[in-house]
Amino acid sequence: MAFSERVSRLKSSLIREILAAAQRPEVMSFAGGLPAEAMLPKVEWADMPLSLGQYGMSEGEPALREALAAEARALGLACEASQVLVVSGSQQTLDLAAKLYIDKGTEILLEAPTYLAALQIFQLFGADCLTVPQESDGPNLAQLRSRLEQHRPAFIYLIPTFQNPSAVRYSESKRAAVAALLDEFGVTLIEDEPYRELTFDGGSAKPIAGRLKKSSWIYTGTVSKTLLPGLRVGYLIASPDLFPHLLKLKQSADLHTNRIGQWQALQWIGSEKYQQHLSELRGFYRERRDGFQAALETHFADLADWNVPQGGLFFWLTLKQPLDTRTLLNEALANDVAFMPGEPFFPDPDRNLGHLRLNFSHIDPARLDEGLKRLAAVVRKAQIEKAA
């Protein structure tokens, strides 16, 4: 059977495979980035116009685009509704950007580690993925400059606010420095901010895209982490030179994002009830973060190092004695616990051993301690076997 050359690069998503394996009710899962079901808001459908069952505009519902542009302007991103494209979850933004920029061998620049599903898309299209290491407050600036001087990548993909998987939030100085470097070298920015609203200390920094003076940019967000992931409603906002191309790519992909989900998103965004919901969500996740931190101190203090996340959904652990955490998966699942190995978050996984991404938002707090206890036991056993 003659498939396209691209299919030879197609990799299944390890996270989706782990989530499938973790479906058994007895499994304590730290694997996925799932919102807590207790915090999914109650939604009403009774007032939805019947006309939304008809085909819609590729750009998205006009009122939703206006609301999203207003929210972005409040963050410091100068834009109009005409620059907003409603997409099928922000995941689609990455697919459209890959189609816009990537041919086989195209060089792009990423954080190391970076979002697993972005890596999957970019590699599918044949990108040569260059990386810049993450520090506790953002990328290493000396290495970023060096990469830009040597390579001039087609774009840089960044997650500056509670990065997935590392939970890093860029400092003000790093945001300003990154913007200045991208302007200096004329490199396009793709800025992914799904976790921005999940801040536990009230911090909210201006997007890097809002600091650019010359470079092209795509800024993307979603309602999946704050409302309902099942709506599959996200958005991108793009500099005017990029928007028409992204719109045509959207049209050829799926005509338009589902209008029913868009209508539901519009009932919330910019409203008082949405602000109330976000406030409750932050408090709920802050409590879960604190409980997780306490349990980690009990079970992992001698095994790993980590920073306490100030937002988002994840802890990122670095083992004190590195080993390939992918080799722990079967043993963990046999002990009814699931986690996400850290290696797949790097373009060169075999050279980046010894990390775990643990989600704290979804696990039942009553099962948290037992789950981390079992996972720690799996790690200890593997390290003893390795040392033997």
Image (cartoon, rainbow, N blue to C red):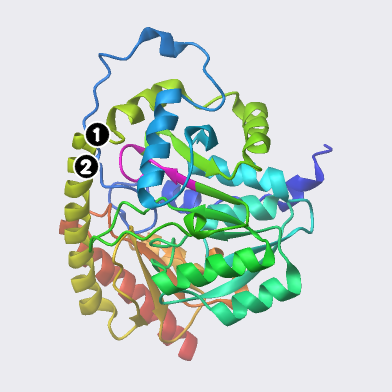
The residue that disc 1 covers is 271
Q: Is residue 336 above or below residue 59?
A: below
Cα separation, mark 2 vs mark 1, equals 7 Å
Q: Is residue 52 magenta?
A: no
**Residue stretch in magenta:** 220-228
Does 284 sit left or right of 259 as displayed? Answer: left
Identify residue type, mark 2: Gln
317 and 148: which is toward the camera:
148
**Image quadrant of residue 137?**
bottom left
Task: Determine the residue positioned at 42% across, 9% down.
Answer: 51
Q: Which percent across, then down, holds residue 26?
A: 28, 51
Identify residue type, mark 1: Ser
Mark 2 element type = helix
The residue that disc 2 covers is 275
285 and 81: which is toward the camera:
81
Cβ–Cβ below 8 Å for labels 2 and 1?
A: yes
Look at the image and tell me whether residue 225 can be seen. yes
Look at the image and tell me whether residue 347 can be seen. no
**Image quadrant of residue 239?**
top right
139 and 167: which is toward the camera:
139
Q: Is residue 224 magenta?
A: yes
Name the outermost residue toward the top.
Answer: 50
110 and 83: which is toward the camera:
83
**Image quadrant of residue 38?**
top left
